[in-house]
Image: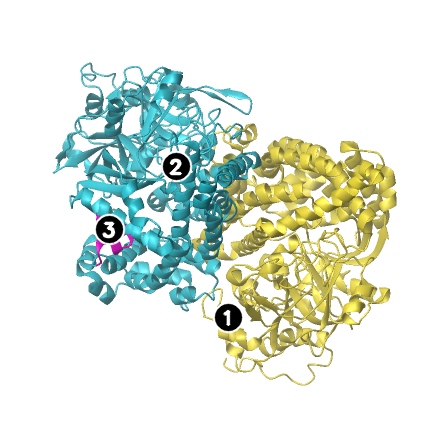
Chain colours: A cyan, B yellow
Amino acid sequence: MKRLVVIAALVGAAPALADEGMWTYNNFPNAKVKEKYGFEPSQQWLEKLRLGAVRLAGGCSASFVSPDGLVMTNHHCARGCIEQLSTAKQDYLANGFYAKSQAEEKQCPAMEVNQLVEITDVTETLNKATQSLTGKQYSDTLKSEMAKVEKACSAGDDKVRCDVVTLYQGGKYNLYKYRRFQDVRLVFAPEHAIAFFGGDPDNFEFPRYDLDVTFVRVYQDKQPAKTPDYFKWSKSGAKENELTFVAGNPGKTSRALTIAELEYTRDVSMPKSLMYLSELRGMVTEFQKRGPEQKRISSNMLFGVENALKASKGRHEALLDKKFFATKVAAEQELRKKVDANPELKKKYAGAWEEIAKAEVQLGNLRKDLSYIEHGQGISSSLFSIAKTLVRAGEELPKDNGQRLREFNDANQPALKANLFSPAPIYPELEIARLTFSLTKLREELGAKHPFVKKVLGKESPEQVATRVVKGSKLTDVKARQALFDGGKKAVEASKDPMVQLALLADPDARAIRKKYEEDVESIIKKNSELVAKAKFDIYGTSQYPDATFSPRVSFGSVKGYTQNGEKVEPFTQMGGTFEHATGQDPYALPKSWVKSEKVVTASTPMNFVTTNDIIGGNSGSPVVNQNHEVVGLVFDGNIQSLGGEYGFDESVNRTVAVHSDAIIEALQKIYGANRVLEELRPGSTKVPPVKANPAG
Amino acid sequence: MKRLVVIAALVGAAPALADEGMWTYNNFPNAKVKEKYGFEPSQQWLEKLRLGAVRLAGGCSASFVSPDGLVMTNHHCARGCIEQLSTAKQDYLANGFYAKSQAEEKQCPAMEVNQLVEITDVTETLNKATQSLTGKQYSDTLKSEMAKVEKACSAGDDKVRCDVVTLYQGGKYNLYKYRRFQDVRLVFAPEHAIAFFGGDPDNFEFPRYDLDVTFVRVYQDKQPAKTPDYFKWSKSGAKENELTFVAGNPGKTSRALTIAELEYTRDVSMPKSLMYLSELRGMVTEFQKRGPEQKRISSNMLFGVENALKASKGRHEALLDKKFFATKVAAEQELRKKVDANPELKKKYAGAWEEIAKAEVQLGNLRKDLSYIEHGQGISSSLFSIAKTLVRAGEELPKDNGQRLREFNDANQPALKANLFSPAPIYPELEIARLTFSLTKLREELGAKHPFVKKVLGKESPEQVATRVVKGSKLTDVKARQALFDGGKKAVEASKDPMVQLALLADPDARAIRKKYEEDVESIIKKNSELVAKAKFDIYGTSQYPDATFSPRVSFGSVKGYTQNGEKVEPFTQMGGTFEHATGQDPYALPKSWVKSEKVVTASTPMNFVTTNDIIGGNSGSPVVNQNHEVVGLVFDGNIQSLGGEYGFDESVNRTVAVHSDAIIEALQKIYGANRVLEELRPGSTKVPPVKANPAG
């Protein structure tokens, strides 16, 4: 892995150079794009982009691709839904899914689509409220002010979602108002084998040959929603050197973190999480060998674990790169020197870095308890999460909106309920395995003598506890959850459900450690990060982009190959290459539909391609559009070098990996005969009857 | 984990302070021991110690405890043997083993005991031979000179083993001549449940309650060997503050490594190995759930993986401790400054650190190929190791002794053959699982496009290859191995055994990467480490101990508690505490024999204890003796703080953890009624009939 050889720029140290940046819609570097690419996006142009691109609340991006609510995203972003709709007999993950009529479109148990309709800067309002506060008072006030602003914005309408987004580590606060869709139905998904061709070995690699696409549709009042701000399909698709825009929701970057925070990540949290994920991966991989049904029910989990593991490895390697880390250290030292040199700035900001460093030490002390007691590494199970939500809902919902744990405030309730009451199946066998695993880690990490461990395990083994609470729980039934939710605290406390009882048992400790963390660590980091961000504004100005926060952003770039280990990597692969790379064995086994269609597919059709757009996890499913707002591709990955993008962007090797728009059309037409989707993407295109697929079968 | 708060001393930077040091028998700090403890071991005293303490060639320590070849070691050191002797019907790991008569003693399939009878300094001989050589020439010459010296020493006698031991990273070379025992038989082993009570959660922890003891016997010419230099049993056992000696074989420390080497370990090799072990652990843990027989056959492997993982974690944390690492950096800088200040020393030594640093960069480039192609992370299976040995034996044995790969030279052949022809059972189901796991990692780490990966996998999946080569192999049969070994290269190359064919396929690549490593990395590090060691001698003198190299060493210390997280930890636990800590659930479930005997065991009998002796992995099974050479305990672990001992010793918290001699007697007598062993340990002690065990059953 050749990585980060040249760091084009460091956020906050200087204006971003080259194609770097995950820009907000209200601070886009129009002039810079014009200078480099000769095209200047107007505010109107950006607005259309913002309205066509949407967010999947579960952690992905997507876009409207028809006026009737058709949404394009990645197969791996809709995997959860596809798996939840599957059964042992009807496995849509293995066989793909195509609704031949609108009536056949199947509702995803827990999918939420958000369209950003308005942005308001609320920095002054919040700053005024928290002025001169510190510690717990600061963060409590900030929290309740945010809740107030959000509530006023959504005004009790479930179809509106309002989030105060913390930008620049608190340097700015923007209120994002979304149109919210919670009725989302599956329209078309290819087989997992081609969506994720090459599997984990090829994940984050290029060249690639994946058809990682899925179409869903948003509904309003049981009818396809009207979505006039959709993207049209490009006739020609992406071309080499073409200017490309990616409109999506990058999840998290850490480019503006202080050295103390980066060191904590590199030396403490990252190694621990890499080991946890590795062990979990070993467990789930072997769990899959129990049989085909066990393989089916755990495959979404395994994908999530492997994907997170590979991404974390890349990030960790970036932080371990000494030269790269030295540039981060140098940037911080320069900033601090400039602050120290100006008495006024020094007075305002100089102490911030030290305060953050101290909070990181405190975080180190709390880490194990926080991860294992509150954050779910110690008691990991879908049923337990449900029980925990029920226990806390009983406690939190009667409180004033601003006083609740943040996930229970009014703005977050629709998402909360969608998850809580999702009819997605929960598999006891997998639940027991996960819970046994996590309880074993709980005992290992906190020690058998830890009071919480003793309380949870008693004289039972982790496996005994897991088996007892899963087998005895009725929470697999949505009605049982609804009854406890409606019954509130009293009903929950009276429940004999062993999973609820476990959640009740664990909750006081979990709340206590969370409180300690919020007061002793989080509030200090928040407050002082805000100061660091303001110092950067004062010194370097505001033509910077904020770290990613899973909120809508735009990046610009162009279709371009790169050099890896001295070899040139071409920007495109072709559909023919897909057949060449097939071995017949998972993860290089093509689905039957492809094998049958080899002869009718035009081998030279572009399959996947790379661009210099600056993206990160969360951008999966983003449309790649040209300057005419036409879809030329679909982001589904970054190359291995892009993983270091968490901490810095290197245009020479960081690449976005996308499905080419032509490959989607070619496959829908010649492999899947999915005319209903085709006609929606390119009206009139199916009038000429397509070549009959499956000539061999 | 409070660790390494005070580093008493750094090897090579200054004479060791306090109880630090894993000393060689020919450079023991007698005067220092006298100064601190009032007792001065004479050379004669040390010789008796050296002859009573033995090494288990597989990676542990032990001691003679009777004149008739009775050897005491840890249960976990004899685990492999115990598991190999077990079957699904007769599970000695679960039920323990006791040979009521000599005839019932069962031969361990592959155990070798070494008694160090003579030490000769051969530094000058080797230095003379390699004088002014560098690179490949240097290491080839060194290797062949070592082989020559070893061969002359053993003179073809299988009962003699001669190893040239590299001390002080090459500052000195000593020839160690051992009496070698290869007929070793199992005499007594308790149940695994009490030997490893508390399991992985309590591993490396204290207080502890483990009876981690096993007795074996060495035979010569089918009769119990005569071992006049044995240790007698102490009447009173270890007492608080008593002076204690540990005579054993610490495996490996890295206290004298350069900063470049430590950084490579911390940032590259250690994180990779922690992830590999974590994933393997997850896999094996879940494999155990396939059924009781699968649990039995994989339990030794799981123990090994978990033990290595926990130890590595502790070491990694030590290296990540910034304060500690700064002391290592400071020590190196001081040394280099002193070298630079003296023109003569500067000329001889100044370049060594930079050369090592460059070799580490090169190691980073080779790491993946080396680990996955040659070192077995990529093709991991007992049958494959056998096949690889057969392939290489055919190639190597016809060569001159000095020209062979080191493991095939004459001195190493007895051990090689013992492993190759071991009748220990090999379980195809576990083999397939391990091989599938490792081949999957091979593809993941080197990439699906790597030529070696393509060659090994072809169009098959890792699982298909693993299943095919394991199921098709006849190498589970010792006779088949013997035939191929006897038939030499021709027979091996003609073999249709798929495992042999896989080994033949892999060997050219494996040899090539090994050669590259030896030439571009190992020889450079060896040569320059020798220079660094000599610089230390020139500047700090010779009253230092060398890093551990799994060769016999002595450490001194005393029985002493410590303080952990502000709480005092008493130096002893009692047998009664064992019963108090039992929950009835693995790993806190006591075996039936113990449950039955609770009332007859004297609760106040000391169970485990801690001392300040400086030990490390490999010391397991070492006797703890008092100044009269009497056994007062049996080392079986170090506390969690001792794991950082890989890099430095902190007397305030580093502790050796041992089974108390009294607990062994009490258990043999009251729980196991193992009178034959008792009588041998303390002649005459069983004349008075012991209290009848098992009053309840």
Q: Are marks 2 and 1 in contact (CB under 8 Å)?
A: no
Magenta region, residue range: A399-410
Which residue reaches farthest bottom?
Answer: B688
Q: Is residue A667 magenta?
A: no
Numbered mark located on residue B556 in the image: none
Q: Mark 2 and mark 1: span between their CA atoms?
A: 54 Å
Q: Tag 3: residue type?
A: Asn
Q: Nearer the viewer, residue A284 or B470?
A: A284
Q: Nearer the viewer, residue A176 or A54?
A: A176
Side (left or right) of A610 relative to B40: left
Q: Tag 2: residue type?
A: Asp
Q: Is residue A404 magenta?
A: yes
Q: Residue at x 78, y 54 (%)?
A: B544
State the image coordinates of residue A675 (x, y, percent, origin top left): 21, 23
Q: Which chain is mark 3 on?
A: A
Q: Which chain is mark 2 on?
A: A
Q: Nearer the viewer, mark 1 or mark 3?
A: 3
Residue labelled with disc 3:
A409
Quadrant location of the N terminus of chain B?
Answer: bottom right
Q: Residues within 10 Å of mark 1 (few under 14, many from 20)?
A: many
Side (left or right) of A111 relative to B370: left
